[in-house]
Amino acid sequence: MPTLTFEAARACVVENVTALRALPQVETVTLADAAGRVLASPVFADRDWPATPRSVRDGFAVRSSDTPGRLRLAGEIRAGEPASAAVGIGECIEIMTGATIPEGADAVVMVEHTRREGDYIEAPAAKPGQFINPRASEARRGGLLLEPGSRIGFAEIALMAAAGCSHVSVFLRPRVAILATGDEIVQVHETPLAHQIRNSNAHSLAAQVRRAGGVPAILPVARDTRDATRALIEQGLAADLLLLSGGVSAGKYDVVEDVLASLGAGFYFDRALIQPGQPVVFGRVNRAFFFGLPGNPASTMVTFEIFARAAVELLGGQRESLLPLTLAPLATPFRHKPGLTRFLPARLDSGETVTHIPWQGSGDVPAIARANVFLVAAADRESWERGDLIQVLMK
C-alpha cells in the first residue's frame, strides 16, 4: 500500500467510516442527561422566537419620527408582563431588556443616552428598528433548530430547553474495544521490572474514547504470539471499533497486521507521513473498523486524536468530525526536516503565543502531559521565525 500524507490518511478515515457505517440505535434521555450525546431526531421551534417584538436594551420605547426631542413618559413595561399601553405621538414608555415592544413604538433609546426631567425625557435621534428584536427574528414556529447528528453542548441544551424538550432522542454511544499488545506490558497496579512498562496506553485511549463520545472496554494485554493476539483481536472485533496499541511496526514480534490479515481484514492504509505515529494502520473486518496505533505513548495519543477520534465520532452518529486546529504566533523560531507532518508537544500561553516543548521522543509522557496543545509542523515547510503563524492542534 502507498504511504499516505496526513491529509490523505485523515480523508480516507472520514470517507470510509461515513460511507460504510450503520447509524447506531436510538434511545431517549432526559434533557439533564443529554449533554455530550449526539442528537438523533430534529428539534423544531414550538413557537416564534421571540413570540413578540422585544427590547434588547433598558431604555425607552419611542416613535422614531418623534426623535430627537422631548417626550412625555406614558408608562412602564417590565420583562415578563404584557404591553398594556401604547405609545402615542410625542410619548415614550420606559422599557426593560426582554420586555414586549408596545404598540406605536418602532425603536428603543438606551436609558444612558437620555436625560429625564420629571415625566419627560430628552431623547436622541433613533432609527426604526433600533434595539428591537422583531417577532420570529431568531426562529419561526416549526422551523428547524437542530439537525440529527449534532453533538449536544451547553448551547444546544439551552436551545432545547427553550423549545420545551424535556426528553431528547440520542444515538447510542459506540462501543470501542482497546487492546494493548506486548510482552513488556504489566498492569497499572503492578511494580514493573526494569525491562517492563505499565499499561498506560490503554488508559489514555479509554479517556480519549470517552471524550469522543464512545464507551471504552479495555481488553487483557495481548502477548507477542499469534495465537494470543488472534484470540483477543477476535474478541475486540465484536465492538463497533477496535483500537490496538503496539505490534504494527516492522519488528520480528510485531504480529498484529499478520493476524488481522488472517481474519480477512481489508487495509485502507498502514503508514502515514506523520511523526509521531508513522506506522499507523486503518482497516476493516466485516462491519468492524480497526486502528493499529503505534505503541509509543505519544504516537498512540496523537494518532487517536488525528485519525481514530473521527471514527468514534462518526460511528456515534455525528454528521461530521472536525479537527480542533487553529493558528498561533511562535514565541521562538522553529525548524524541522520537511517531508513529514509533525505533531509536537507545545504550550499555548496566556498571550496566545506557542512554544515547542523539548522532549525525548514519542515515549516522553511527561512532556506530553506538560503540553496543552500540539504544534503542527507542515510537511512542506522547513522553518518558521518568531511571530510567524503556525498551526496548533488543541489537546
Image (tube, helix red, strand yellow):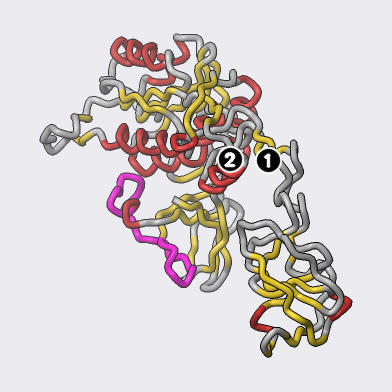
Establish if 145 lies above or below 256: below
Estimate the x, y position of residue 350 in percent, counting from the top left: 43, 69
Q: Nearer the viewer, residue 271 or 35?
A: 35
- 262 in magenta: no
Q: Is residue 196 left or right of residue 57?
A: left
Q: Is residue 82 left or right of residue 301?
A: right
Estimate the x, y position of residue 221 in percent, counting from the top left: 26, 23
Residue 128, located in which quarter of the rendered image? bottom right
Q: Amino acid at mark 2?
A: Met
**Residue drawn at point x = 86 percent, y = 79 percent:** 66
**Looking at the image, do the residues carrying marks 1 and 2 touch, with CB atoms under 8 Å apart?**
yes
Estimate the x, y position of residue 5 in percent, counting from the top left: 59, 40
Estimate the x, y position of residue 211 in percent, counting from the top left: 42, 39
**Residue drawn at point x = 57 percent, y = 35 percent:** 165
- At mark 2, the secondary structure is helix
**Residue drawn at point x = 16 percent, y = 35 percent:** 195
Mark 1–mark 2 Cα distance, whole angstroms, equals 9 Å
Q: How many callouts does the rendering have? A: 2
Establish if 360 lies above or below 116: above
Q: Main secondary structure of the magenta part?
A: loop
Magenta-tinted stretch: 347-367
Q: Where does label 2 land, which residue?
A: 160
- At mark 1, the secondary structure is strand
Q: Where does label 1 land, which residue?
A: 145
